[in-house]
Amino acid sequence: MTNPIRRLWNDYSTASPESKRRVQRALTPGWLVIVAVLAVWVLRNQQDQLRDIVDRLKTANRNWLVAVIVIEILSIWSVAYTYKLTLDRLGHKASTAYQFDLHLQRTGVNFAAPFGGAATAYVYVERMKRVGINRQDALLALIMRTLSVYGATVVVIVLTAALSGRPLFVIGAVIGLVAMILGLIALARQGQGDWKTILRWARRLPQKMQRQLVNAIDQFKEHRLTPADFLGTVATTLLTRICTLAMIYACVRAVGFTPDLYGIFLAYVASFVAARIIPVLYGMGAVEGSLTLSLQRSGVPADIAIGATLLFRFFDFFLPSLIGLAMYAWAERKNPSFRRLSVERVPTTSQREEAEDL
């Protein structure tokens, strides 16, 4: 007998983008109601613990808070530099400062839109058009960035397994790391436009992912891109992941606790998965819960775990989103051309990953 949950997931994963959006719109109010009910329950029944959390936040170490801000700026810069590298590969002269400003604006749009992926892609394409970069290359930059996100995340997951201390996980992680190193060597040795090795690997992927990867490779070939051209973007995307890990660590230190490295990696992976399961406002409720529980599981006291999670979400998501929204509104006030842009002229791409990097 077929597992009904698995069958339901298969139906959803193979549905059209419009059908997925209808499902998301239908489920969003229910999820927000659940989050609101849980928040009210906590406020009514956990007042003593909330006071302890507030006290810890008030007395948070200022030096670590400054470190959090510096790490966040470095994280955004790494995303901007990734786009600069990508556009340089496509034959355009890109400014890191402009990409930095644009990424913040897209974060604000993602915050304002219930499901900001398509909206942020529209903003990126329109802004790139203003500086003379055509729509196809702008979309290709988004695709390269998304593929780099997947690659960097796999590295973090393998490292998490290596740090777990469980023999089976450690052995698997070592094998995975060796395989990745050999894969990078193979990629670096590929000739101009030679994607044969990647295409052979792609046949082992699920059909939908295989089709997406093959379509992307066809576009890369048109631009004479080689697999080695991705190494720089994967490296800078991995830097973004390291910044996120460092920020979680700094937030825990700011409220007076020294966590172990495995706990930080586990918290990051759990929050990453939660944000994919609940895409509303980048996993509102789910990310906070997964971060808190993961930190507690690694030995962090409950009040410190909650306080660190609140700090992380404020500096990593809410503050950049509000700043980005203000920057976007100001940019549109000076040049309202985006309001005249036809939505039909810009293809939809999946860019939910972008919010995670802020």
Image (tube, rainbow, N blue to C red):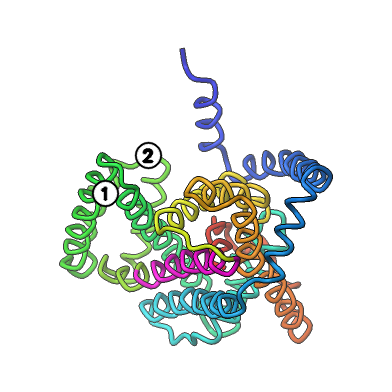
Residue at 57%, 68% (x, y): give it.
358
Q: Residue at x 45, y 53 (%)?
A: 263
Q: Give the main secondary structure of the magenta stretch.
A: helix
Q: Position of residue 66 (x, y in %)?
A: 58, 80
Q: Which residue is mark 2?
A: 206
Relative placement, left or right, of 129 versus 341 is left
Residue 188 higher or lower than 334, as above or below: above
Q: Secondary structure at mark 2?
A: loop
In front of the other: 4 or 211: 4
Give residue 242's position: percent from left, percent from top. 42, 67
User: In the structure shown, which secondary structural element does the residue marked by tag 1 occupy?
Assistant: helix
At which x and y percent is residue 111? 69, 63
Q: Which residues are magenta?
A: 235-255
Which image quarter: residue 27?
top right
Residue that label 1 marks: 173
At label 1, counting other C-alpha atoms closer than 10 Å, the crowd grade (few under 14, some 14-19, many 20 or more) is: many
